[in-house]
Image (cartoon, rainbow, N blue to C red):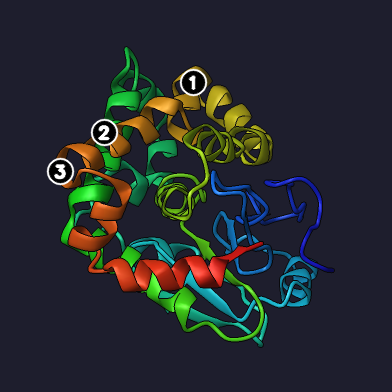
Amino acid sequence: MPVSSAAPGAHIRLEGVANLRDVGGWATTGGRRVRRGVLLRSAGLGWATPADVEAIGALGVRTVYDLRTRGERERQPDLLPTTATAVVLDVLDGHLDTVPAHMLDLLEDPPRASVALRDGVGEALLEQAYREFVTLPSAHMAFSQLYRGLLSGGEGPALVHCTTGKDRTGWAAAALLLLLGVPESDVLAEYLLTNEQLLPYLAPLFARFAEAGGDPEVLRPVLGVQPSYLRTALDLVHAEHGSIEGYFDSALGLGDDLQRQLREVLLRG
């Protein structure tokens, strides 16, 4: 299965792995294009079928960056092809009160979750999580190591994921694309593809939530993505670091030279 050469953001459909796509293919403001086959993104691999594992191997994936907490990893261990190496980069290390760290726990008591997340509470919790992606030392370390890993990667693409592949993974992809010069409108479009490539996989979950007495509408802002989430992180980047380049430099320790190397590795044309 070759890495898709279709439109940027094209969904790579697998049975048990949601939200899988190539981060490449997007055009930059400078007339170049992000290389395909360098970085893929997805939801967790713990639900992968044997055919999915074979397909991920056929994509050539050699390194899988897992952004989840220890509890998430223990609850749903990744299923990887034998040719892939796992690299754990815990974005929320020690900050288990953040919504993405216990996304699945929210579903265990639907009536209570429906009360707890209504009236915009779910959206506010996600926006706070995105602020923490920008400010937490553990997030700085994880994202820095991810981008450094792309500089030293060997043959075949890397794959980055968290649990649903939308928040920690979404910020990792968005920040990188912005650094590479992809217009913010296209970065937002790539980010919002999660609503098309993840939520349909979760239809049975929504149904079970409703059957157990929950209001499935409160799940949509928590299990999907909204422009305000990404905007919250970007506004904080500009307030604290001046620009995406400043964030990579002062927060992630990736200065001008390493930023230039990232562009050399990830851009063509």
Tag shown at residue 240: 3
Which quadrant, please, contains the C terminus?
bottom right
Q: For the residue labelled by badge 3, is the local secondary structure a helix, a strand or a loop?
A: helix
Q: For the residue labelled by badge 1, is the local secondary structure a helix, a strand or a loop?
A: loop
Tag shown at residue 200: none
Say which label, 1 or 2, has the lower sequence index. 1
Q: Can residue 126 be seen in this view?
A: yes
Where residue 1 appears, as percent x and y from the top left, is: 84, 69
Say which label, 1 or 3, has the lower sequence index. 1
Q: In this view, does 7 lie above or below 161?
A: above
Q: Residue at x 62, y 35 (%)?
A: 199
Query: How many angstroms separate mark 1 from mark 3 (CA)?
Result: 43 Å
* Label 1 CA crowd tier, 10 Å (few <14, some 14–19, many 20+): few
Where residue 187 appears, as percent x and y from the top left, is: 52, 40
* Label 3 CA crowd tier, 10 Å (few <14, some 14–19, many 20+): some
* Label 2 CA crowd tier, 10 Å (few <14, some 14–19, many 20+): some
Amino acid type at image mark 2: Asp
Residue depth check, mark 1 versus mark 2: number of the one nearer the observer: 2
Q: For the residue labelled by badge 2, is the local secondary structure a helix, a strand or a loop?
A: helix
